[in-house]
Image (cartoon, helix red, strand yellow):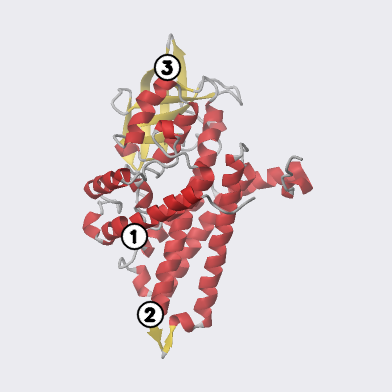
Amino acid sequence: MDFTISPRIEDFRARIARFVDDAVMPVEADRANWDAHDNIAHAPLDALRQKAKAEGLWCLQLAPETGGQGLGKMGMAVCYEEMNRSIFGPVVFNSAAPDDGNMMVLEKIGTAAQKAHWLAPIVAGDVRSAFAMTEPHPGGGSDPGMMLTTATKKGDSYVIQGRKWFITGAAEAQHFILMARTSDDPRRGLTAFLFDRDEPGWHIDRRIPIMGPEEHGGHCELVFDELVLPADRVLLGEGLGLKVTQIRLGPARLTHCMRWLGLAKRCTEIARDYAENRHGFGVRLADRESIQIKLGDLAMGIEIGRLLVMKAAWELDRGGFAKKEVSMAKIHVANLLHKAADVAIQINGARGYSQDTVLEWIYRYARQARLVDGADEVHQMVLNRHLADERHDFWRWPVAAD
């Protein structure tokens, strides 16, 4: 593959980098701009979003006809990495989870009416959204085949019963994509639905306290007690819910990695800056071989992550599914982020453990990376399954047509 990027993508990258440095970083640096859940408060967020829109840096991942710039996955990889040099960056550009993944799946498979009603307000930034799939034991988590939430057909409507949990952003979401079981067919038993927070028949049971900082709307447990949805709320088609999850979650796992690379680079940046200025026993930390080894190892790990992400993005852009590539990127970058935060804290010492930098924020956030959108072990099993099926061809190179 060709690792050069187009002048257009480089222009977006450079403009995003400047915007993050000039507009987002000063907001992040002032704790008065943070909310009670360690995220950016609504007032400063709204102001930054208006600036991003005015500068043409809004929803770059979507097609022009949807309101974006049509960057493609490779362009997104370049730009998302720059966005997340700030812990608040992605949400400013409307490129943060879960809205990011929800917009892309609605753009890809929604009907014209569904896009107008459910997608357009998210693109405009008027509402937030959530994706409700994960359930408490014994329901479905990484294995959607275990899903217990049901959608029973009654006339022209579906009646939803069940429970979901750890639903990101639910407390502030207006639009939801919901996965439920419509039959016991192992391949066509799940269906995706659209619903609005103001509809009766469901409620948020609790906002689950977590170790890390929270996205807007937290991570919630939802209870469905006869939520009635008309047939036009079905996304893609009855029994095609598993396909909806595959369309949404594959790219969403990769966009997580794109953003996490930006955070890993921020950790390295904070560690390097401190090491270059901090002296101990008459020697700069940056001149100590042990520090040089740590920072060099992080630099290599980040570059490996970028290559894995870019290969997966390339495969998606050319029409492939990139299942192996996404799993490899997800495992590596999730672990890399945790390592980058840990090493940076170690180099910064007590300062890194304090709230004088964002390292402790990133460290708490990073631990979830190895769990969300499939735990490390799930992706490792996926890779082993591909290895068992493909054997030596697991490592084959794609061959260009004559």
Q: Nearer the viewer, residue 41 or 307?
A: 307
The residue at 43%/52% (across/down) is 11
Quadrant (top left, top right, bottom left, bottom right) of the C terminus: top right
Residue at x-position 26% and y-position 57%: 27
- Which callout, 1 or 2, points to the residue nearer the camera? 1
Distance from the alpha carbon under mark 1 to that under mark 2 = 21 Å
Q: Residue 232 carries which label?
A: 3
Give the mark nearest the N terminus, 3 or 1: 1
User: Marks 3 and 1, how far apart in space?
Assistant: 44 Å
* Image spot of residue 368 (x, y percent): 45, 52
Residue tagged 1:
21
Disc 2 to disc 3, C-alpha distance: 61 Å
Kind of residue at disc 2? Asn
Q: Which tag, 2 or 3, sits closer to the chain's start?
A: 3
What residue is drawn where x is 43% and y is 15%? 231
Position of 162 relative to 169 (above/below): above
Which corner quadrant of the image does residue 263 belong to?
bottom left
Mark 1 vs mark 2: which is more N-terminal? 1
Give the amino acid type for the residue marked by disc 3 in the picture. Asp
